[in-house]
Image: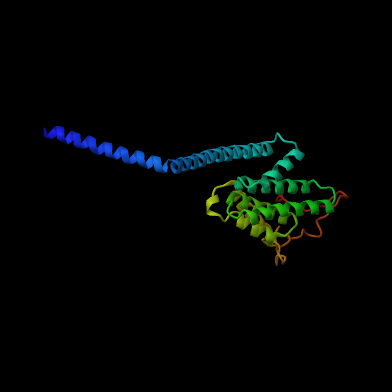
Amino acid sequence: MKSKRRHELHENMLAGELRKAWEFLKQRGGQLATAALIVAVLIFAYVLYSRHSESNTLGVQGEWDRAVNGTAKPEERAKLLEDLAAQTGDRRIAALSCVELGYDYATKALLAKTGYERTALEESAGKWYQKTIADFPTQNLAVAKAQFGLGKLYESQRKLNEAAEQYRLAKSSPELVGQPVAILAESSLQRLKMLESPVVMATTMPTSAPATGPTSAPVAAPTSAPASPTTVPAVAPTSEPAKA
C-alpha cells in the first residue's frame, strides 16, 4: 500500500508540474517563440558569415597563387597584386603583395634604358617596400623581405651605410632565424663589410735587394802569356785547371 501511495504521489506531482508548464506556455508562448526565432536567425547569420569568410579566404588565396606562380601576364600580375595589397581579409597576403610589387619595380629598374627611368622605378619600388613596413609591422616575413629589398636599392645607389642598416634589420627578427631572407641579408652584410675594409698596400721599397750572385769578382787572368810560335793570342782558362 505504501508503494502504491508513493506512486500516486509521484503521479500527482508530475501532473502538477505539467499543468504549471502548460500555464506558463499559454502565458509566455509568444515571447518564447520570438526568442527562439531570434536565436535561429542569429545562428543562420553566423553560418552564412562563416561560409562567406571561408569562400573569401579561398578566393584571396587563389588570386595570390595566380599572381605568383607565373601563369599571369605581367599586366595581369600587377593588377592582381594591387588588388591583393588593398584587401583587408588576409593581411599576410596583403603584406606579401606589397613586397612583390616592390620587387617587380626594382627588377624593371635594373633593365631601364635611361637614368631618369631607373630613378623613377627605384622610387616606386621603395614606396612599396616602405608601405609594407609601415602598414604591416606585425608581418615579420614580409617586413624582412621589404627591408632586404630596400638594402638592395641602397646598395645599387652606392649608399652602403643605409644598405647595411637595412640588412641588419632584415636578419634581426628571432622568428626568421634560418629563413632564406635572413641568410641572404647576412651574406649581403658580410659582403659590404669586405668592400668597406681597406686593402693593405706596401708603402716603402725594400732597403736592399737579395744577393743574386757572388759578392766579389773572380781573380783576373794574367795580362800576358809566354810567346807561342803562332800568331793567335793565348786565352786564360775560365772553368777548368790546366792539364799537365
Q: Is residue 16 visible?
A: yes
Residue 116, horizontal then vertical, whole percent: 84, 54
Q: Quadrant of residue 14?
A: top left
Give above or below for 158 relative to 73: below
Residue 123, horizontal then vertical, whole percent: 76, 54
Residue 175, horizontal then vertical, whole percent: 53, 51
Give above or below for 202 relative to 35: below
Left-right relation of 102 to 142: right
Q: Is residue 193 visible?
A: no
Front in this rendered view, residue 112 or 188: 112
In the rendered image, which quarter contains the N terminus?
Answer: top left
Residue 3, horizontal then vertical, whole percent: 14, 33
Question: Quick one: which residue is furthest to the left in this view?
Answer: 1
**What residue lies at 68% left-to-right and 55% top-to-bottom?**
130
Left-right relation of 56 to 236: left
Front in this rendered view, residue 67 or 216: 67
**What residue lies at 65% left-to-right and 46% top-to-bottom?**
87
Front in this rendered view, residue 139 or 145: 139
The color scheme shown is: rainbow
Give above or below for 231 relative to 1: below
**What residue lies at 69% left-to-right and 36% top-to-bottom?**
70
**What residue lies at 23% left-to-right and 37% top-to-bottom?**
12
